[in-house]
Amino acid sequence: MDHLNRRNFIRNTGLLALSAAVPLLGLQGAAFQPAADVYDIVVYGGTSGGVMAAVQAARMGRKVALIEPGSHLGGLTSGGLGWVDVGDPQTIGGLAREYFHRVWQHYQQDAAWKWEQKHHMPEQHVPLPPNDQTMWIVEPSVAERLFNQMTTEAQVTIVRHERLHRGSGVSMKHGKITGIKMESGRVFTAEMFIDATYEGDLMAASGVSYTVGREPNDRYHETNNGIRPLPLPGRFPEGIDPYKIKGHPQSGLLDRVYPGWGGKVGEGDEGVQAYNYRLCLTNIPENRVPFEKPADYREEDYELLFRFIEAGGMESEFFKTALGGSFLKLDLLPNGKTDTNNNGYISTDFVGMNHDYPEADYVTRERIAKMHEQWQRGLIWTLQHHPRIPEAVRRQYVPWGLAKDEFTDTGHWPFQLYIREARRMVSDVVITEHTTLGKEVAADPVGLGSYHMDSHAIKLFVSPQGFVTSEGGMFVHIPAPFGISYRAIIPRRGECGNLLVPLCASVTHAAYGSIRMEPVFMVLGQSAATAASLAIDRQTTVQEVPYDLLRARLLEDRQIIFNR
């Protein structure tokens, strides 16, 4: 069995984490040597979903530790994703609704407006009732301040700068986690654990079944999974030569361009949709940090951008209308700032350079994240200053720089790479496109999804016509909000009885394109903590928590779990 097939076999049988961490087997039933920090519930990962899980557990009277490997709470919501994708805001209840109500309250204050006069922001969604008003647009620093505020009020113990020892950091006995060890040697024990990371590291180290990449369509009888067909005409202009020297195949392909898409349409692979940083930019001179030419800048890294322009890509109807004539999606936030996101197929996404990230060690992940930062810094400098960029385009972007009063401890660059997908658990219930499209209904919902199935590009390759194009992009409309099964956020029966996984849930690649939105993670985090607390009350596993009891408590706490 070759290496790739072995990895696929191990992953599909749920043994991947154990095979990569053999010392874990020797810890089954063993006690950790260091004195442990003892809690009722430990939440690993200070993402937005992790914060809501910790706050909910604390409000239910539990002693809670929220462990964040980095410095900041809030994940992407405070890490640059200030123009929050939510779908239908009326599907978001509980602590998430409370959080976005606090955002609204903040911007009702005159003092909140430092760089411009207080004014109405054209939000993405229609307003909710006045006593329940929300705002889905927020500056990163404000977002983080509100997360810190909620955890402080709930008296959650915050532990920063502690990373799970992924090789031998999970102790288990009788199918339950008894403790987790950090790289520093610090140990945490609890009755219940919640993995609220984007990567699913605690889940993987606990021996729980999971997958990475795209399932083949025939596995769950889907139509939107696996290798995707060519994008719609006009999105990638015909004529972009794929070779380092135009017209000379012997010169080799441009970096990041594959000779083909690697299989047949609908077949699975290990590709994950592209990552990027959501940048907080401003054009207010007093608060702007200009982009400088990166020291390691390589013009050839942006050859695809130059050739896109030279091939007439900016003149296409898709670029001028759907993309607004811009290579950057500059969504406005208060105080003259933006949430700057990818916009189309030549933009801030570093397509194809993240496929190793989900399984990589910490050092490799940091290297991949740095590569993404270097790519985006160079891209924006190129758009602002490079002579091969039309002068009108340079004038369009040169006023923008990083916001000086954001991310002040990381050089004004976001602390969080946008991990759009990584590992995904494989549980007794796997949510597929059949649920998102309304063909199947969850019997035990603990939250709702309402965003369309959205995947960014996965691979650049040479089309049959001999030009550069991409595959993996997807935006499939769903007919109505759908329920997310409780069994999709807990492991299979018999695998781990005291772990919940609200972010890397049991969802196919296709359906995850809808569920992966930050407000949904917040909802699922709260629901996971509720179930964990009820399991403690009943001294049972998460798999044995009665759904009727869980549903009653979720509704009591204003969660919205049924489509109205």
Image (spheres, rainbow, N blue to C red):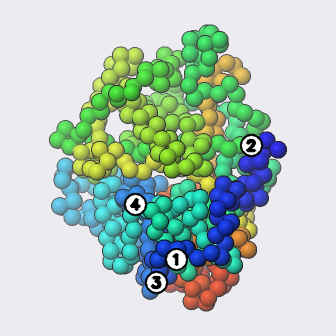
Left or right of residue 373, residue 533 in this image: right
Task: List the residue tagged with mark 4.
Answer: 161
Q: Which residue is drawn at the image coordinates 18% and 53% (left, top)? A: 114
Q: Earlier in the sequence, mark 2 or mark 3?
A: 2
Q: Can residue 5 be seen at all in this image of the molecule?
A: yes
Q: Can residue 280 be seen at all in this image of the molecule?
A: no
Residue farthest to the top?
A: 247
**At label 4, which amino acid type do we have?**
His
Q: Earlier in the sequence, mark 3 or mark 4?
A: 3
Task: List the residue tagged with mark 3.
Answer: 62
Quarter of the image with the C terminus is bottom right
Callout 1 environment at 10 Å: few (<14), some (14 to 19), or many (20+)?
Answer: many
**At label 3, which amino acid type do we have?**
Arg
Q: Position of residue 79 (x, y in %)?
A: 39, 53
Task: List the residue tagged with mark 2.
Answer: 4
Quarter of the image with the N terminus is top right
Left or right of residue 145, residue 434 in this image: right
Q: Which residue is drawn at the image coordinates 59% and 58% (left, top)? A: 167
**At label 1, which amino acid type do we have?**
Thr
**At label 2, which amino acid type do we have?**
Leu
Q: Earlier in the sequence, mark 4 or mark 2?
A: 2
Label pair 1/2, CB-CB below 8 angstroms: no
| 3D distance between C-alphas at marks 4 and 1 | 18 Å
Callout 2 environment at 10 Å: few (<14), some (14 to 19), or many (20+)?
Answer: few
Q: Earlier in the sequence, mark 3 or mark 1?
A: 3
Q: Position of residue 229 (x, y in %)?
A: 70, 36
Mark 2 or mark 3, whichever is nearer to me:
2
Q: Which residue is drawn at the image coordinates 71% and 71% (left, top)? A: 495
